[in-house]
Amino acid sequence: MMPQPHTLKIFEIFPSIQGEGLRQGEATLFIRLSGCNLKCSFCDTKWAWQGGKQMSTTVIVRTIERLHKRFPAEWVCLTGGEPLLQDITDVTRNLKKHGFKIQVETNATIFRSLPVDWYTISPKPDEYFFQPEYKKLAKEVKIIVTRELLFETIEKLRGEFPQATPILLQPQSNRKWSMDLGLKLLKKSIQHGLNNIRLSVQLHKVYGIR
């Protein structure tokens, strides 16, 4: 009996523009994996917690290659849900062999050794826990500006990452109260001498794109 190919539960694969973080505005092919281990109340992709379709690495890569023909982005972003709940080793290796740059967006509670070019990590409340490997590997640390976010949390996270790694304050679904709080927290961070704290925004929601 032939062994069954490794599959991943995929919610959707689509071309778009990266709307968040330092890669904001760049053409990107997205692979959204199903499932999440945190299920935050403020999550804006709750629909990806369940459902999805089992797809083999071969089918996933072929889908990306097909999309690339009409939308020639050099970046592929694996997101969720929480993409690292599933073993994405094979698909990332295959995408790299096809010449793509790989970004992973993760809550950082799980670490896997992968051929990834860009880790965007977003530790979540209450503990804002992250695996220690990300201290060196994270290209950016994204904090969602919830109503409960305190300056002390920003200060703690700033101290746990290299100064060259930016801490991004991203408003919760671009809501006005969240943007106002983010600005207030940024000003306080500057006053207390914290370096490389930045305001962010969800660009795809401004433009009304997927």
Image (cartoon, rainbow, N blue to C red):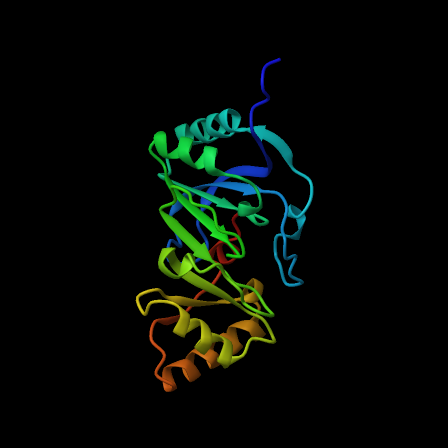
As drawn, which residue projects farthest toward the top? Answer: 1
Find residue 140 and report its horizontal and vertical position in percent.
39, 60
Relative to 57, does residue 176 appear above or below in the rendering? Answer: below
User: Does any portion of residue 71 appear in the rendered image?
Assistant: no
Nearest the viewer among 71 and 208 is: 71
Question: Which residue shows up at 43% across the image and 63% down it?
Answer: 141
User: Does any portion of residue 64 appear in the rendered image?
Assistant: yes
As drawn, which residue projects farthest toward the left? Answer: 164
Q: Quadrant of residue 146?
A: bottom right
Question: Which residue shows up at 56% across the image and 47% down it?
Answer: 80
Find residue 24 and report its horizontal and vertical position in percent.
40, 55
Number of numbered discs on residues = 0
Nearest the viewer among 186 and 119 is: 119
Q: Quadrant of the N terminus?
A: top right
Find residue 159 and report its horizontal and vertical position in percent.
39, 74
Nearest the viewer among 172 and 132 is: 132
Question: Which residue shows up at 46% across the image and 29% down it?
Answer: 61
Nearest the viewer among 49 and 110 is: 110
Relative to 49, does residue 179 appear above or below in the rendering? Answer: below
Q: Is residue 155 left or right of residue 148?
A: left
Question: Which residue shows up at 57% across the image and 62% down it?
Answer: 173
Find residue 49 and report its horizontal and vertical position in percent.
66, 48
As drawn, which residue projects farthest toward the bottom? Answer: 191
